[in-house]
Amino acid sequence: MSSAAPILLTPGPLTTSARTRQAMLVDWGSWDERFNQLTASVCSQLLAILNGAATHHCVPLQGSGTFAVEAAIGTLVPRNGKVLVLINGAYGKRLAQICEVLGRDFSTFETAEDEPCSAADVDRLLHADPAITHVALIHCETSTGLLNPLPQIAQVVKEHGKRLIVDAMSSFGALPIDAREVPFDALIAASGKCLEGVPGMGFVFAEKHALGAAQGNCHSLALDLFEQHEYMARTGQWRFTPPTHVVAALHEALLQYHEDGGLPARQRRYANNCQVLLDGMAELGLRSFLPAAIQAPIIVTFHAPTDPRYQFKAFYERVKAKGFILYPGKLTEVDTFRVGCIGHVDAAEMRAAVAAIAQALHAMQVLDI
């Protein structure tokens, strides 16, 4: 561990394996048949993770996860549709902002940053407003690490005959989601999260009938998932220049994912990382923001020390000098910082990170630890 090659304890980009990085050393022609096969293999493997091949298409898209979220809303929500956006953090607010920018009618329901939205809330809201056609939520709200009850909400949305769009950016690949049991029109994730690829590619699992009915909905040429899927199905190629190295890295990361034991093994490692982190930070007197019942093993938000000598920037730089990159807090009312549990790291690195945090705070003469 050196300052030149730190371990990224963030929600993405994150630390990748040497094999994944090595996969990016080959240049690919975007029309080459071998690259087309690579793309098809990646999409097939992604669909298999959520048992979605029978019901959903996997539509890859150039860009970050937010590009894919905007593409899903813009493509699958008709221009006369209305979206109920469930918010308990910054990324829920981003969903609402996307709807606003796209000119889609929407309403919001916001709970506290430490309070999941409930299926009962959704049931009440859908009864109250029959104009709603779609519900959008964040599965794991990355601004805190909070886990929303996706299966229960999905069932209520289905019972009302409405459509569900799920931002599963920070959960897909590590937390179980089964398309045979959880109904959704779209579930969105990205390469640089729990699959431990590199950033640069989003993907949308779009329900086949919903995608087939979406022609002409989209506001954008480049973000049109209907056209992206139609072109790829017809030619095997991406419509526009693909992120070739990102696709190759994700293919290699998926090979390792399966070699390691797939989703159950990934979930166990992240859960162990999270517990080691929570236990170690508690010994330092640093409190986590969320109760354990709603804490996803993805990223943990901690209350910042109250000592006036604590400043996040100085703290960040000291921890970085010891080989670890942390994340600033994203809460509006409380001073916090965040530590990720995901990436190509294990319990040993988490213990080392806790030690680096302790040393940094002691060096800053922060008294409350």
Image (cartoon, rainbow, N blue to C red):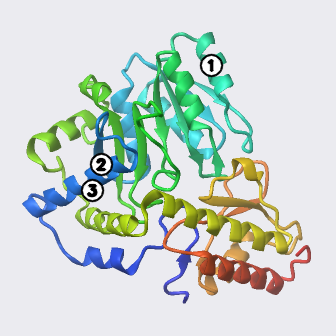
Q: Amino acid at mark 3?
A: Val
The residue closer to the viewer here, 9 or 257, is: 257
Q: Amino acid at mark 1?
A: Asp
- Residue 208 in sight from this viewpoint: yes
Please report the residue visible at 71 percent of the width from the left and 78 percent of the height from the top: 354
First in residue order: circle 2 vs circle 3 = 3
Q: Amino acid at mark 2?
A: Leu
Counting from the top left corner in percent of width and height, residue 141 is at 60, 47
Determine whether 285 is above or below 319 in the image: above
- Label 3: which residue? 42
Circles 2 and 3, Cβ within 8 Å, touching? The answer is no
State the mark number for residue 61.
Answer: 2
User: Furthest-bottom residue in view?
Assistant: 2
Q: What element does badge 1 sit on?
A: helix
Dot 3 crowding, Cα within 10 Å, few <14, some 14–19, many 20+: many
Name which quarter of the figure residue 340 lies in: bottom right
Determine whether 278 is above or below 203 in the image: below
Please report the residue visible at 60 percent of the width from the left and 66 percent of the height from the top: 341
Determine whether 272 is above or below 103 in the image: below
Q: Mark 2 to mark 1: distance in Å? A: 33 Å
